Image (tube, grey):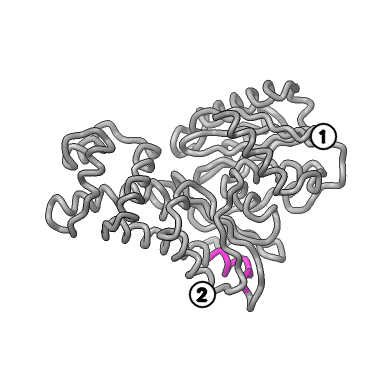
Amino acid sequence: MNRDSLVQLPTALVSPAPPSQARYVMGIDGGATKTLAAVLDLDTRTVHLAQGGPSNEDAVGAASAVDTLLVVADQALARAGIEQGQLAGAVLAVAGTDTDAIARSVESERSEDWIVVNDVVGAWAAATGGRPGVGAISGTGSNVFGVGAGGHAWRVGGWGHLLGDQGSGYWLGCESIRAALADRDGSGPPTALGDAAAGFFAVDSIEALAALVYSKPLTKGEIAAFAVKTCELAQGGDAVAHELYTRGASELAAQIVAVIHHTGLGGGEDRFPVGLIGSVFRAGPIFVDPIVAAVHHVAPGASVSVVEMAPVGGSLQLAARACGRADAIDRVELQRLLDGALANAA
């Protein structure tokens, strides 16, 4: 069996390009629920945003994903008031098990300066600034990626909702419905998840929800959204809901630990960041604390924290790096600009 890294960083992202006077860069964060594009003017320190639907190939197919990515990109360019030719570079971080088809289509439609990577690479950059460390995504789906001090990259997870996505919103939503059904048929412990799910999905009973899952069927995003209710029940003392978050944290932590091992991070007291990115981490200590404990067990020097920067910020940092402006803006300022732009767009 091939044991090479599942994700290789493109050459343009491995090391900073020679310094340049590039002004405009674009970052895109494409997921199973939505796609966000941001154009950053490095001279005036302004961010221009555009948003569209899903661009995960696994969810909508390659052709639809590419269409969404390019439409949203063009909208962001228009809002920045620039033409495509004025853009120095773009990094499109897109969710999905395989982004090669999207990368080929985007390059043929635009140029080689439009670099497509898996969304976990953008998350890693948002967490680490493109330096050695680990980025772990838990949103609609889940994925973990890291780069060691020697530049060796490794990805764990990212196999999609049928074969993976452990510890994600979709995983939590599915496991919550399964737990509710087990309560209903007497094979599992009692839980308030059944009534909560019936109310959330506007059906008469948990049995009706089971039928809806197969007949409609429910989308990944719709199922993942129920994780918020599972969190509320867990925080309110529902033992089954709490166990789901504990189990999800254990699954995701195991993937983070595998990345640490394969990248050579965590030797002795080595210090490096482990960034947690995505909506599921808003659950707080019931999800985050078990992950922190598991990571510190193998890497005491790791700094594990929830990343506040929007994932599209990682794509912007990589785009600046690829066109020779890696040091043009620091992460603190970029986060402030993105937060302001997102607040205005809300």
219 vs 149: above or below: above
Whether residue 32 sits left or right of residue 338 in the image: it is left
Q: What residue occupies the far front of the structure in this picture?
A: 236
For residue 43, the mark is: 1
On the question of residue 276 being in view, the answer is: yes
Is 31 colored magenta in this rendering? no
Q: Which residue is mark 2?
A: 297
| Residue 82 percent location from the top left of the image | 75, 22
Secondary structure beneath label 1: loop
- Please tell me which residue is depicted at 68% across the width and 38% down the height of the picture: 337
**Residues shaded magenta:** 258-266
Badge 2 amino acid: His
62 vs 173: above or below: above
Badge 1 amino acid: Asp
263 vs 331: above or below: below
On the question of residue 5 being in view, the answer is: no
- Which is more toward the observer, 229 or 63? 229
Secondary structure beneath label 2: helix
